[in-house]
Image (cartoon, rainbow, N blue to C red):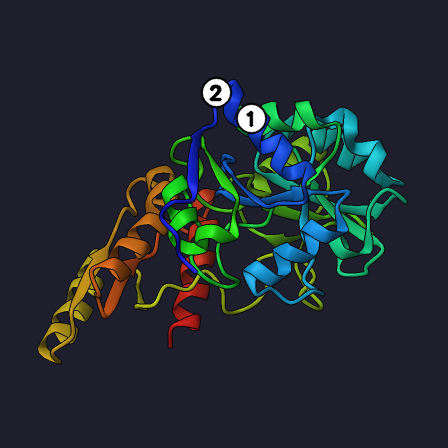
Amino acid sequence: MTNQSTQILDGDAESGINLAIQNLRDNLLIGLPTETVYGLAALASSRLAIAKIFKVKERPTNHPLILHLASYADLDKWTVNVPDYARTLCNAIWPGPLTVILQRSKNVCDEITGFRETVAVRVPNHRVALKLLNSLNDGLVAPSANRFGKVSPTTAQHVVDDLGSDVSLVLDGGVCSVGVESTILDCTLSTPQILRYGAVTTEQIKSICEIDIDLSTGESRASGMLEKHYAPKCRVELAETSDQAQTILNSLIENGLTARVLDYSSDVIFYAQELYASLRRADSLNIDVVVAVMPPNYGLGVAIRDRLTKASTATH
């Protein structure tokens, strides 16, 4: 249900923060800006509100949520048996776009973890999110504020467009500075595994921790691990070069389809910031096919390639 009258409030205003706190304590859901994407936030202590997240997102209840904390100092409230390398990493990166999976403490309810013995946690690097978290004396669960498997929101208006009155309000913190979801690192294994690529790269993690890292194996146990995800309504075709994209585009147009090329491959930071907004614009213009030029396969480019590959799988 879309309802344009859903309140978008200035996230930097005290009045907006205070109303958000009141709504969260009343077991309501709010739209929350982070540096990655906008989240659909509920109090970590409210089973009722957490259940609403799954209903609103149409998300499987065994799909774990990420717990957002105010600071590194909160880690031991929500987790146990944290490896030394994970402490080093979190201390170095947080606040920032890194989620770590650790053994959960008794303070974490089953609804957050999909009834697993592990929990995914991070400290977001956004002034509005941190101000709210520091005022709450609680954690927030905040998956992306969109329907399950669809394109994530990177502005307050995207949240309203997707969820309407299913959110009580949205705190506006501007356009997300990163634009793709956080890196997820499973720290419960003998060798840590990256389950989702993001702005914190494999190379960064290795240099900070001086440890080996494996690629993900096993069941889907974290956000974004499904093969089909981040899907717009339009079809997404992939190209490795601008020339290849132009060839695909010409063929699509010859076949009577409306199509456009998405190519920010020369600037991966801008590509990440613009990726989801560009896919949303294509849908609003009823474009049949977006031909996306893949960025280089290193650094942040790895995360963008991951999102585009999943979007293309989901739309075929």
Q: Is residue 284 above or below residue 124?
A: below
Residue 249 lies, in percent from the top left, at: 16, 67
Q: Which mark is residue 17?
A: 1
What residue is drawn where x is 73% and y is 27%?
72
51 shown above or below 5: below
Place of residue 109 in the rendered image (x, y in percent of width and height, measured from the top left): 82, 50
- Residue at the disc numbered 2: 13
Amino acid bearing label 1: Ile
**Residue 254 visible to an observer of this rendering:** yes
Disc 2 is placed on an element classified as loop
| Quarter residue 87 falls in | top right
Q: Mark 2–mark 1 contact, CB under 8 Å?
A: yes
Q: In this picture, is 251 found above or below 293?
A: below
Mark 2 nearby-residue class (10 Å; few <14, some 14–19, many ≥20): few
Front one among 235 and 268: 235
Residue drawn where x is 75% and y is 27% of the image: 137
The N terminus is located in which quarter? bottom left
Q: Residues within 10 Å of mark 1 (few under 14, many from 20)?
A: many
Identify the residue at horizontal 37%, vertical 63% (top origin): 232
For the residue pair 149 and 43, the one nearer the viewer reads as: 43
Name the kind of residue labelled 2 in the image.
Ala
- Identity of the residue drawn at 73% across and 52% down: 48
Callout 1 secondary element? helix
Front in this rendered view, residue 81 or 216: 81
Toward the bottom, the furthest residue is 255
Q: Give coordinates of residue 151: x percent, y percent.
A: 42, 57
Q: What is the CA distance from the residue labelled 2 to the residue labelled 1?
A: 7 Å
